[in-house]
Amino acid sequence: MDSLQGQLLVASPALLDPNFRRAVVLITEHNDEGAAGLVLNRPSPAPVAEIVPQLEPLVDDGEQVWVGGPVQPNAVLVLGEFLDPDDAAVPLFGALGFPALDEPEDVAAQTVRRRVFAGYAGWGAGQLEDELGRDDWILEASRPDDAFTEAPAELWADVLRRKGGIYELVARIPEDPSVN
């Protein structure tokens, strides 16, 4: 399978794992050894200033930490959209990458937007491919605005609607089908 780096995984309605129910995951790495990504639509109630005060210069006042996934929830990752992608310590795709965090003020000057995540989503070798084979995930190309959504509660349905076709109907499925 070709690398899925830069793609979105949209949880199918049948995926009931609470870590990924209605999740939209940006794949940041995918190779023969496995895959990693960030859940884009799970803001936490905790502000960056409270959880990782040293990163406060990177975000707007009151910006919260986002839950990137269930793996290493105490790990902090910053995703940035770089003015020059060569400035990223770990370039991902397009203008997105992970910055070096030793000088947060430099990161702010090198990037247009930043988001702070706690944890990430991860899959071992072949695991993501198995989940895709079971139709646990729907693939869609990512757009830069997806990673910095201002409407996380709507991202799942928005991405499905833009995919079109049958997915426009899937986007309308209520979170609790019993209330339909």
Image: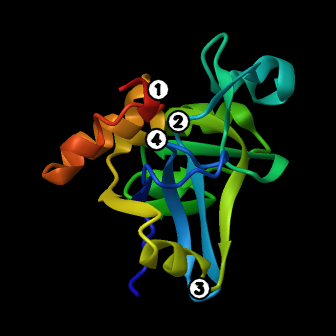
Nearest the eye: 153 or 114: 153
Residue at 39% across, 34% down: 155
Nearest the eye: 126 or 148: 126
Of marks 3 and 1, which one's residue comes earlier in the chain? Answer: 3
Crowd rating for badge 4 (residues with CA inside 10 Å; few <14, some 14–19, many 20+): many
Of marks 2 and 4, which one's residue comes earlier in the chain? Answer: 2
Secondary element at image label 3: loop
Q: Which residue is mark 4?
A: 147
Of marks 3 and 2, which one's residue comes earlier in the chain? Answer: 2
* Amino acid type, callout 4: Ala
Residue at 52% across, 36% down: 41
Judge from the rendering whether residue 51 lies leftward or rightward of residue 171; answer left or right.
Answer: right
Secondary element at image label 1: helix
Nearest the eye: 75 or 98: 75
Residue farthest toward the front in the current orientation of the protein: 178
Secondary element at image label 4: helix
Q: Which residue is mark 2?
A: 41
Judge from the rendering whether residue 164 lies leftward or rightward of residue 62; answer left or right.
Answer: left
Q: Which residue is mark 1?
A: 153
Q: Which residue is mark 3?
A: 126
> What separation in Å lies between label 2 and label 4 (alpha carbons)?
9 Å
